Image: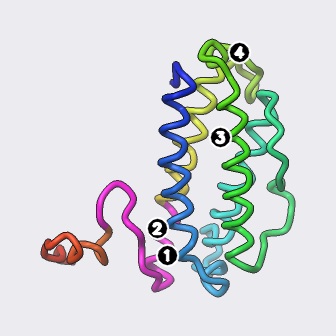
Amino acid sequence: MFLSVGHFVQSWEAEMNSTIKLMEILTDKSLKQPEHNDIRNIGRVAWHIVTTIPEMMEKIGIDVGGPTEKDPIPTQASEIVAAYRKHATSLLNAVKRWKDEDMFVEDEMYGEKWQRGITLWILIKHEIHHRGQMTIMMRLAGLPVAGVYGPAREEWSKFGMEIPEL
């Protein structure tokens, strides 16, 4: 749970930049990968990350605008990245106007009462979860993967480290 605006801002900026870094690798072709009946494709997961921001924030009184899960998934990766950047930045700017005590305001969330600091914490964890799914699908689609919490396999040599064995 976030107890202060500053802690959220610092965390959201880092996670937002990591998500953008990963989404910027996506190609239009990769959005349909993998083609499998039981797995969401990269485009759907990336779009879900985008649409969750306005969906959750609306419940706590923050209007970041933006698409819903029912809106069509863009066919261009650049549109997904642009939408994410816009709505993630809008959220950041809205929370920057809060006071720390706003983190303790309770809102109705999915049939429960959540403090806003919890809602923001869950939003970040949700995004991290789906970003992890995307990295696996990106590998399966033959895309390089950007390191987020440490170097990805493709980046080890930049740090003078031996590439790990597969």
Question: Would residue 66 appear left or right of 128 to someone viewing this image?
Answer: right
Q: Is residue 110 above or below residue 19?
A: above
- What's the distance in space between the residues labelled 1 and 3, CA to CA? 27 Å
Q: Residue at x 70, y 17 (%)?
A: 113
Front residue of 61/17: it is 17
Type of the residue with mark 2: Thr
- What's the distance in space between the residues labelled 3 and 2, CA to CA? 24 Å
Front residue of 122/9: it is 9
Question: Would residue 148 appear left or right of 68 to someone viewing this image?
Answer: left
Answer yes or no: do the residues labelled 2 and 1 have beta carbons within 8 Å?
yes
Q: Residue at x 50, y 83 (%)?
A: 141
Q: Which residues are magenta?
A: 133-151
Residue 138, label in figure? 1
Q: Which residue is mark 2?
A: 135
Which structural element holds mark 2? helix
- What's the distance in space between the residues labelled 2 and 4, CA to CA? 34 Å
Does label 1 or label 3 sit earlier along the sequence? 3
- What's the distance in space between the residues labelled 4 and 1, CA to CA? 38 Å
Q: Is residue 5 above or below residue 39?
A: above
